[in-house]
Amino acid sequence: MREVTCEQITEAVKQLCMDANYELGADVVTAFRKAAQTEESAVGKEVIGQLIANAEIAAAERVPMCQDTGMGIFFVELGQDCRITGGRLYDAINEGIRQGYGEGYLRASVVQDPLVRQNTGDNTPGVIHVELVEGDRCTLHMAAKGFGSENMSRLKMLKPSDGIEGAKDFIIETVKMAGPNACPPMVIGVGLGGTFEKSAYLAKKSLLRPLGQRHARADVAELEEELIQEINALGIGPQGMGGRTTALDVHIEVFATHIAGLPVAVNINCHASRHKTAVL
Amino acid sequence: MKQIQLPLTEEQCTGLRAGDRVELTGTLYTARDAAHKRMAETLESGGELPVDVAGQVIYYVGPTPARPGQAIGSAGPTTSSRMDAYTPRLLEKGLRGMIGKGKRSETVKEAIVKHRAVYFAAVGGAAALIAKAIRSAEVVAYEDLGTEAIHRLVVERFPVIVVNDAEGNDLYEQGETQFRLG
């Protein structure tokens, strides 16, 4: 059985936290450049221009692109033939967050309790999801999730009779309610099906997909396209100041569900769609 | 692009319209959730605010830690609506302007008109770019709140856009109506 040490995991996590906050993905920058060409609103164009300049400064100077450097979200794909040695996986990840946020001059934005609200001072703990997969690798996907957009996310248990139209209405209503607060242009992650928590998990995970990549299933891909068009017709625009660029992309993931249910979860991400991957 | 020297006067506020692009130069204060809560509690108990907000602008921001040699870390706006509950009281105390991002409540918009103030948006997520316009930062109150402490900032050509003006106009409403299809 192949072994990966906790030390390797901590080192990788530390690097992921910094890189995710400094270097916006090429897919997002490409989407900005495209929007700069197509946006019809003058203020909208100005906003997109600032976002491109901001991404360039952050990458060149290795400073965070946004002051909300997020809560660290981890999707770990652990191969069945990979063994973690030298400690606990969860501790290794949290130690990586501690080092990455500390040494990287990233903001500590986590409170230790939702009611008492004392800042933990080192941005731990992260939210860590582990999935067992085939193989002997340990893949770490890290997302730095800001809460301006997280706060505008919603979940609803629809009836099966609500169907696609019901789901679309709920998704579009969520985007309308998010408006300027979620820092548009947004990336909209949707989880359809499963259970209450599974739909939210799928919505979050869908945000890791590169912008511009459609779902493998033709009917789901078509639904994504329809939603992109309808959301960009809302007029919300960059930063909600009016314009044609409201969604950079819509990603939908689906899962089997119960005969009585149609869960739909909408996880909104701001334009600072920050995620990086390491394979150990 | 309009150039404005801070602190902001009532006359300057009256001349601003939703949608105006403005660059601010001068001194302003930072405060977000925890500092607002503490200021509200102070006023509630009959105390004095740690800074005189009359004629001043408050920026809703919790910056990242500064690297050695930097005046401030990345410093973009946070969502303003979380401050809505506290804002009318500060406007009564003479607060002239606010910088944040996102929609304000009807109560806040009415108070902006009543007190001849202004609400600006800075571009959310443009925090590295905005930091370039901040020349210096010093903590002036609530140091124990860390990133949420009240800082005095000296800014030069800080880029903002007028969202809510003293006449009751709202850029978010105007923009969406103008560009909505169908």
Image (cartoon, rainbow, N blue to C red):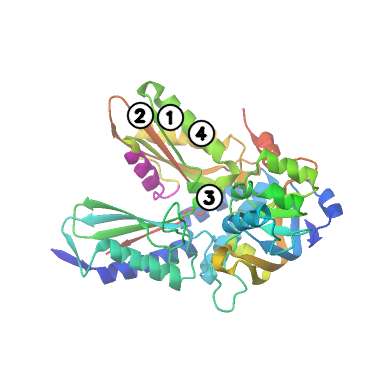
Pointer 3 and pointer 2: residues touching (CB < 8 Å)? no
The residue pinned by badge 2 equals: A262
State the SS at label 2.
Answer: strand
State the SS at label 3.
Answer: helix
- Mark yes or no: residue A269 visible: no
Q: For marks 3 and 1, give the CA distance.
A: 23 Å
Q: Amino acid at mark 2?
A: Leu
The quarter of the picture where the N terminus of chain A appears is bottom left
Q: For marks 3 and 4, give the CA distance.
A: 18 Å
Quadrant of the image occupied by residue A100: bottom left
Q: Tell me what residue is drawn at x 28 percent, y 25 percent.
A: A259
Task: Determine if marks 3 and 2 fall on one subunit.
Answer: yes
Q: Residue furthest left?
A: A1
The quarter of the picture where the C terminus of chain A appears is bottom left
In the rendered view, would you say B136 is above or below B34?
A: below
> In the drawing, does residue A207 fall left or right of residue A82?
right
Residue at mark 1: chain: A
The residue pinned by badge 4 equals: A172
The residue pinned by badge 3 equals: A148
Residue B25 pos. (x, y %): 76, 65
Task: Determine if marks 1 and 4 fall on one subunit.
Answer: yes
Q: For marks 4 and 2, give the CA distance.
A: 16 Å
The residue pinned by badge 1 equals: A167
- Mark 3 or 1, which is nearer the eye? 3
In the rendered view, would you say B41 is above or below B169?
A: below
Q: Which residues are magenta?
A: A197-211
